[in-house]
Image (cartoon, helix red, strand yellow):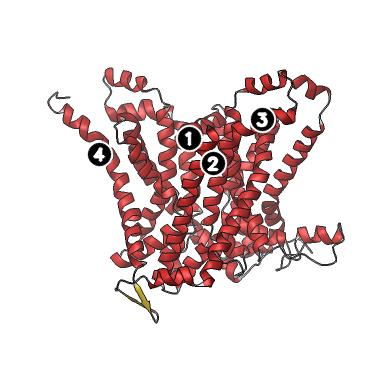
Amino acid sequence: MQPARAPFRRSSAPWFLLLPAFLVMAYAFVLPMLVFFRYSVYTYERGKLIDEFSLDTYREFLTDPYFHTIIFDTLKVASITTLCSVLVGYPLAYALWRVKSAAAKRWLGLIIFSPILVSVVVRSYGWTVLLADQGPINWFLQMVLGFPEPIRLVFNLTGVVISLTHVFLPFVVFPIYSTMTRLDPTLREAAMDLGAGWWTTFRRVTFPLTLPGLLAGAQICFTLSLGAFVTPSLLGGGRVIVLPLQVFTATSDINWPLAAVGGIALLILAMLTVILSNRLLRFSEV
Amino acid sequence: MLTRARRLPHYRYILLGMFAVAGAIYVVAPLAVVVLNSFSSVAYSVFPPEGYSLRWYVNLFEQQDFYLAAVRSVVLALIATAIAMTVGTMAAYSIVRYRRPWANLVKASLLSPIVLPNIVLGVAVFMFFIRTGAYGTYFSLVVTHVVVILPFVTAVLTAALANYDWSLQEAAMDLGAGPLRTFFKITMPQISVSIIISSLFAFVISFDQVETTLFLVRAGDNTLPIEMFLYLQKWQDPTIAALSSVLIAFALVIVVVLSLVMRNKDLEATLLQQDRETDK
């Protein structure tokens, strides 16, 4: 190595290594997003796009009750899914953490996490079969529990939420389990030595210390649910219209301004979720 | 605590155990029912099945569309993963190794697409490629997939490199190895678990990508998930169940191979360590 050239090489090497990543990001992320924002202020008239500045699409989106319903449904689906995922995911993570036998731990972990490897299309399809009027669940309800007629579980909000919870469960269990393994065992022992029962120990020690993991999992689940497209379109049966479906439909109808505004609404919701939960996270760690 | 539990399994342990079993059933049920349904003898889904046959598998193997779509998906995912791994490793190395003041900003900007719902990215690249005339090219599809998986790869690899003992690298360089040789011979083996994990996830995310691909492929060039998604919107016959069972079998093979390959390495510890690092 020639000493005279070394300083130059040292200062340019980090940038040279970053260059490909920046090029890819600029070409397929930054520029497309700029074009996307640009189209949100285009004029759309009788099936044609006109390059004229207008805020009509935003106005329409914010005042039309149809879009209010869509935004409300999107938030409803995401909230219920997050709630269900946390209610199922926290005890599962707890069981995974507390189980003593190594084999049981490995199997439970494998069962919880391997569905990530299976396509969302396959898993959503599985739920349409499972929840169908003539499917196993309704068979069980009618034959074993004696329900007079099948309960409509699919092609409505119920089916979408059950399936989305299944899809996002690993993403909720993982951060919770991760905070649990990080927990200092002496804290729990100290609490028990000082006479606290298991419930008090859980409530005053374990739960508060794993709250950051729970919030992180909830944030991931909420953001992913907001953007879910495959599951609502396969299990919603056209009755559950969420923002991603609206964006897709508007794009197919060549109403690009409407697609762009819907996408921006989705993006704002996702960013608000992240900001809000980061605030909560900081609060929960103090 | 331990002794008390052994003496008398407290009801809360029994409840927790029952919950874990119920949770496991909930996770496995939709996959199990798909496999069961694929052996059905009738075209409609009914439980319990009215009879068993292999006709849907026969039907599946007669449909060339699915086969071609699967090949396209594998090729696309392999190319996108290879590019993202190369680009992502270079970026992660730069961020961790040189520790410049801008490192955190660069990392945050490379991870920023994670917040973006994929469908928004899909529509945005669709509009952009139509506008620039790149729509329909294979390049546009590959580069979009790279953008989707790059944040995950970068996150895992920066975490792995941050935990890597850099004095090893210095030792190798001092002994006269060039930077590339040092990287491939010394650094890479040390972070091999993270490399395997991140490329596996990158492959799976790319292979299963629906939201972005949907806008970028022309009717005859569908990838497998798109082909399945569109098929399901028209028909619901168990051909899809047979195809899904094949995919589930592949996922099982991946799990088995991975657990064999990683037998000597503490996979769980690696994953948790990564999570810890990315929290910071």
Check whether the beta carbons of the residues at disc 2 and disc 1 lie within 8 A of each other.
yes
Q: Amino acid at mark 1?
A: Asp
Give the chain letter at badge 3. A
**Label 3 crowding class (10 Å Cα cut-off): few <14, some 14-19, many 20+?**
some
Q: Amino acid at mark 4?
A: Phe
Q: Which mark is residue B279?
A: 1
Q: Which residue is mark 2?
A: A216
Eye-nearest disc, 3 or 2: 3
Residue lying at 64% horizontally and 57% vertically, measured from the top left = A161
Compute the Cα span from label 2 to label 4. 34 Å
Q: Position of residue B105 (x, y in %)?
A: 34, 39
Eye-nearest disc, 3 or 4: 3
Up the image or down, B114 lies above or below A97; here it is below
User: Foreground residue, A281 or B189?
Assistant: A281
Q: Are marks 3 and 1 on the same chain?
A: no
Check whether the beta carbons of the residues at disc 2 and disc 4 lie within 8 A of each other.
no
Q: Quadrant of the N terminus of chain B?
A: top right
Residue lying at 61% horizontally and 41% vertically, measured from the top left = A173
Q: Which residue is mark 4?
A: A16
Q: Amino acid at mark 3?
A: Arg
Q: Position of residue B228 (x, y in %)?
A: 56, 62
Q: Which residue is mark 3?
A: A204
Q: Which mark is residue A177?
A: none
**Label 1 crowding class (10 Å Cα cut-off): few <14, some 14-19, many 20+?**
few
Quarter where residue A191 is shown: top right
